[in-house]
Image (tube, rainbow, N blue to C red):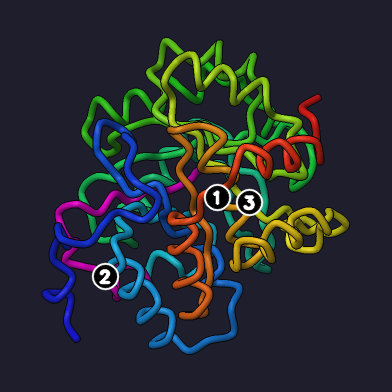
């Protein structure tokens, strides 16, 4: 198969329906590339999964230069990119000489990361760039000269947008107050950790609702960080999945889609069967009773 076979699949229903991202319509179930770096699969298998996703109607690919080889895999799989594919990357961290993830929050470092993404993806513009703030755990936290005010960061990203190197500006791992403060910059999406068992960012989500901003929850199954409960192990989720004849993961993704009509999911996998399952979650319809039962699992705080 060649990339020529990945032209726009207008006859394939968009998984989960569609919503706008940086002014473009994308399938509400996209693909997060980070798992391709973590997986112990051959490069050819990773390329095949990405092509399977696009053939299945996915046109929103989430990545980051600091994920490692993900951008190279995306380029090998999809370039020259189908015209409807939206590439979204993230800046705010880099890998050091030992391969450890370290903060890179200064404006000049953000610019260097955008340039690195352009080069590794083989594009002249990244459709959306998310600014990953490093204010609090989980994950790495900025300190010393890496503690940078968000206005300086946004000014650099606005300059890059004005130069045509990025399309939209997004925010990642941010509070409602930070989103509110950044609104004049023109924020196209917010990407925070969020699942049906972890809903501490509901205030941020509510702000996105009122401002018509796309919401991109990462770690949608709640297991991205050690010690956090797995959504797929929850008895209520398992019971609802059994009633519907679907998997617990599909219930979790369906709940997120139902929670806000501009939610864009980016589940990642290197397993073709899991990819098929993820895309099929867009067809799962939860009853009001099931949604009410799930809502009680983790009331917003």
Mark 3 to mark 1: distance in Å? 10 Å
Circle 1 — which element?
A: helix
Q: Residue at x 34, y 46 (%)?
A: 17
In the foreground, 238 or 125: 238
The residue where tag 3 is placed is 220
Residue 213 vertical position relative to residue 53 in the rendered view, above or below: above
Estimate how packed mark 1 is, as few (under 14), some (14 to 19) or many (20 or more) residues with alpha carbons within 10 Å: many
Estimate how packed mark 2 is, as few (under 14), some (14 to 19) or many (20 or more) residues with alpha carbons within 10 Å: some
Residue 269 x, y percent position in the rendering? 53, 70
Q: Tell me which numbered mark, 3 or 2, is placed earlier along the sequence.
A: 2
Residue 237 x, y percent position in the rendering? 74, 55
Residue 80 lies within the magenta run: yes
Circle 2 — which element?
A: helix
Residue 44 x, y percent position in the rendering? 38, 88
Q: Residue at x 63, y 25 (%)?
A: 148
The residue where tag 1 is placed is 254
Question: In the image, is 9 to the left or to the right of 109?
Answer: left
The stretch in magenta equals 73-91
Question: In the image, is 46 to the left or to the right of 136?
Answer: left
Residue 258 lies within the magenta run: no
Marks 2 and 1 close (CB-CB < 8 Å): no
């Amino acid at each position: 198969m060649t990339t020529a076979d990945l032209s726009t699949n207008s006859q394939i229903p968009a998984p989960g329906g569609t919503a706008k991202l940086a002014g473009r319509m994308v399938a509400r179930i996209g693909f997060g590339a980070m798992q391709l770096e973590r997986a112990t699969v051959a490069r050819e298998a990773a390329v095949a999964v990405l092509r399977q996703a696009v053939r299945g109607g996915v046109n929103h690919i989430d990545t980051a230069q600091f994920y490692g080889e993900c951008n190279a895999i995306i380029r090998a799989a999809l370039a020259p990119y189908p015209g409807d594919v939206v590439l979204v990357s993230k800046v705010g961290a880099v890998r050091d000489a030992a391969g450890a993830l370290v903060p890179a929050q200064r404006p000049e470092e953000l610019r260097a990361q955008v340039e690195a993404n352009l080069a590794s993806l083989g594009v002249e513009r990244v459709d959306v760039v998310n600014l990953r703030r490093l204010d609090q755990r989980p994950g790495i936290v900025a300190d010393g000269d890496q503690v940078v005010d968000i206005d300086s960061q946004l000014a650099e990203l606005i300059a890059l947008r004005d130069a045509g190197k990025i399309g939209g500006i997004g925010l990642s791992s941010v509070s409602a107050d930070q989103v509110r403060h950044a609104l004049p910059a023109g924020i196209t999406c917010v990407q925070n950790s969020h699942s049906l068992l972890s809903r501490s960012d509901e205030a941020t989500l509510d702000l996105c609702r009122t401002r018509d901003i796309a919401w991109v929850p990462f770690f949608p199954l709640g297991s991205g960080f050690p010690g956090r409960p797995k959504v797929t192990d929850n008895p209520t989720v398992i019971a609802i999945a059994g009633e519907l004849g679907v998997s617990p993961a599909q219930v979790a993704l369906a709940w997120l889609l139902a929670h806000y009509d501009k939610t864009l999911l980016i589940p990642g996998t290197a397993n073709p069967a899991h990819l098929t399952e993820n895309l099929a979650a867009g067809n799962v319809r939860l009853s009001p009773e099931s949604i009410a039962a799930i809502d009680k699992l983790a009331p917003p705080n």
